[in-house]
Image: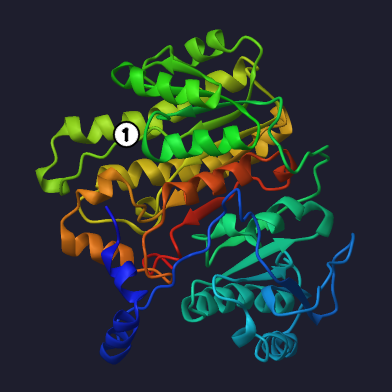
Amino acid sequence: MADRYLSFTGTAPGRFLTRRLGLPQPAVLRRWSEGSPGFEGGVLHLTAGKSQLSGPAFSSPSGTPAAVLLDATGVGDVEGLAEVHAALHPVLRSVAESGRVVVLGAPLDPVDHHQAAAQQALEGFTRSLGKEIGRGRTVNLVRLTDASAAESTLRFLLSPKSAYVSGQVIEVGAAQEADVDWSLPLAGRTALVTGGARGIGAAVAETLARDGARVVVLDVPGAQADAEQLAARLGGSALALDITAADAGARIAEALPEGLDVLVHNAGITRDRRLVNMPAERWSSVLEVNLASVLRTTDALLETGTLRRGGRIVATASIAGLAGNAGQTNYGASKAGVVGLVRSLAPRARAEHGVTVNAVAPGFIETKMTAAIPLFIREAGRRMNSLGQGGLPADVAETTAWLAHPASGAVNGQVVRVCGQSLLGA
């Protein structure tokens, strides 16, 4: 369903009226397209404190900045935080509409509480700046120790692909070697998307195929026709399978004898009702699809070696699992469970199998499901974020593609919200 309010605020009468009434004035977000894959304008590189990074320096092209990259890895005390203010204060007004601000921070030092306090302060700073900067611009914090490990993350955050990702803190570990074709990074790789026939799953399949992957679209037998049609258009294949079946993992392994490089757990359902009115079937069906099947199939595909070394697992959480949502105790529990899976499995999966494990956590995304929500609740969902609008399935897909990227091996155990910086749950 079209966002008529967003369209209205883009007109002269709409701008006048909303300004007079003090109503939100969301900007039309600049997203990736084949004809316009990047921003016009340079990336302004600033430094606060003495940089702690190793690796190549970032360039600062001249001209009006489309983005600002602030290296704050050397900020180690309260005085250093003043340099953050001094660096950004004069330039923020000049950042283009739908532009980007990315702050680079360092891991918190467990034995230097002054450094830890200053670096933690950067989190509150970036989240707050994201809520005030406006005009479709985003602000994110990347904690890293080696600049050479951050290329895929910075390419994503400084591009139109990250249009609906703001207020996030992303940790990037040690560099992982990868020979990458940046134009087709997933060429020669196989990706499986569960619940891939429609909605967000279909957008993920399309984006991974755009990046060169051979995509397997998995969905329930009732959606087989849609899955086959999508797979044919993408040059991939379809797999009709109930992901909750006890042997689902074995059947996936059998269907992919040459192995799998990217596993996207997208399949999910809702059965909303307040807990006092929720029968056991509504509870168990949501937990079974959204969490139990993810655990079983992940275990099976790792144990059989179907997921090859260098592989990527990207699971779908939700801001409902992070902040909670009335009427969704079952859904919130299942999506919080996905977060627990990611945080526990990620270090072991990389150490034992060479596979990274991350999650995306969508907020209000414009789909057929959200279009059925009552008007006033739908409008609240759209406006209650820093960007003042709902996201698109493509926003979740682009974030998934970044996490699936061969050069994103240093990104592991992360839960990245794709919610326009929802005002719920920070």
Find residue 266 and report its image quarter.
top left
Give the image location of residue 332, x and y in percent.
Answer: 32, 48
For residue 339, side relative to residue 102 (left or right): left
Give the image location of residue 382, x and y in percent.
Answer: 32, 63
In the depicted structure, whether residue 141 falls above or below residue 324: below
Give the image location of residue 279, x and y in percent.
Answer: 13, 35
Q: Residue at x 37, y 39 (%)?
A: 199
Q: Residue at x 70, y 27 (%)?
A: 353
Q: Nearer the viewer, residue 317 or 258?
A: 258
Would you name the residue on which mark 1 appears?
287
For residue 400, side relative to residue 174 (left or right): left
Q: Can residue 71 be seen by looking at this rendering?
A: no
For the C terminus, give its image quadrant: bottom left
Q: Nearer the viewer, residue 91 or 114?
A: 91
What colour scheme governs how the chains and residues are painted in the rendered image of this protein? rainbow
Q: Nearer the viewer, residue 410 or 343?
A: 410
Q: Residue furthest left?
A: 277
Give the image location of residue 190, x and y in percent.
Answer: 63, 24
Find residue 409 and report its image quarter.
top right
Q: Residue at x 45, y 16 (%)?
A: 239
In the depicted structure, whether residue 256 falls above or below residue 35: above
The 10 Å Cα crowd at callout 1, few under 14, some 14 to 19, many 20 or more, is: many
Dot 1 falls on a residue whose secondary structure is helix
Q: Can residue 7 be seen by looking at this rendering?
A: yes
- Specify the amino acid type for callout 1: Leu
